[in-house]
């Protein structure tokens, strides 16, 4: 091998070693920010607020349904009525109108009376759970304001109801 070849081989070896050499680059260390501190919230006293009427899963349910020709409250609505009664206790300025309804079967007079009995049943349940009678008004629409107009049991069952309408929050 001549000198020139040796020099080229040596230069290539040095270049290869230099390329394989581990290069350390110093990365700037970013300071670690302290965890954000959550703003302190006043502890809830457990009372309902007017905003809860639109967001609380219990309070947004405002219809009580009844069986045919009945004014007895079904057990499945007890929790809902308990929530609304608590709202009335928590908010003495709140007012509710209880709108009683019936399906199309029966005379107009009978259905007006049935709607009123249903409204009074819900009124009684709210008062029994701590609501004030002075916060409640009962009105009956009988069969005059149906939510469904078909002539079948599924539709009629939707019309046998009391709607809880807040007139003051």
Image (tube, helix red, strand yellow):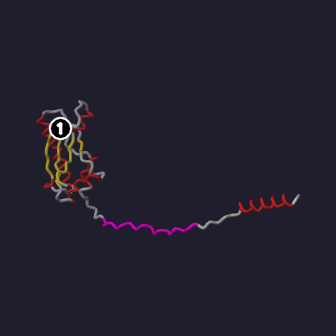
Q: Decide which of 8, 20 is in the foreground and name it.
A: 8
Q: Residue furthest front?
A: 4
Quarter of the image with the C terminus in it: bottom left
- Main SS category, magenta section: loop
- Is disc 1 placed on a helix, strand or loop? loop
**Left or right relative to 92: residue 2:** right
Q: Residue furthest right?
A: 1
Q: What residue does disc 1 label?
A: 145
Residue 130 image offset from top left, x and y in percent: 20, 57
Residue at point 52%, 68% (across, down): 30
Residue 110 image offset from top left, x and y in percent: 13, 36
**Left or right relative to 50: residue 15:** right
Quarter of the image with the N terminus in it: bottom right
Residue 166 image offset from top left, x and y in percent: 19, 51
Q: Decide which of 67, 92 is in the foreground and name it.
A: 92
Q: Residue furthest left?
A: 109
Q: Decide which of 30, 120 is in the foreground and name it.
A: 30
Q: Is residue 92 magenta?
A: no
Q: Dot 1, how many residues are within 10 Å of its Cα: few (below 14), some (14-19), or many (20+)?
A: some
Give residue 105's quadrant in the image. Answer: top left
Q: Decide which of 70, 157 is in the foreground and name it.
A: 157
Residue 129 image offset from top left, x and y in percent: 22, 55
The vertical placement of 90 against 142, above or below, is: below
The total number of labels drawn is 1
Residue at point 22%, 60% (across, down): 90
Give residue 106's quadrant in the image. Answer: top left
Q: What range is drawn magenta here?
A: 27-43
């Amino acid at each position: 091998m001549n000198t020139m070849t040796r020099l080229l081989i040596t230069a290539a070896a040095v270049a290869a070693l230099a390329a394989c050499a581990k290069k350390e680059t110093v990365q700037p260390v970013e300071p670690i920010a302290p965890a954000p501190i959550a703003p302190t919230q006043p502890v809830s006293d457990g009372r309902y607020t007017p905003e809860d009427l639109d967001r609380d899963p219990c309070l947004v349910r405002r219809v009580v349904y009844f069986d045919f020709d009945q004014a007895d409250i079904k057990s499945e609505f007890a929790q809902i009525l308990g929530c609304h009664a608590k709202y009335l206790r928590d908010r003495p300025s709140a007012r509710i109108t209880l709108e009683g309804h019936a399906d199309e079967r029966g005379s107009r007079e009978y259905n007006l009376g049935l709607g009123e009995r249903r409204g009074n049943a819900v009124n009684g349940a709210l008062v029994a759970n701590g609501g004030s009678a002075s916060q409640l008004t009962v009105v009956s629409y009988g069969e005059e304001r149906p939510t469904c107009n078909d002539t079948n049991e599924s539709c009629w069952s939707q019309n046998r109801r009391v709607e809880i309408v807040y007139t003051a929050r």
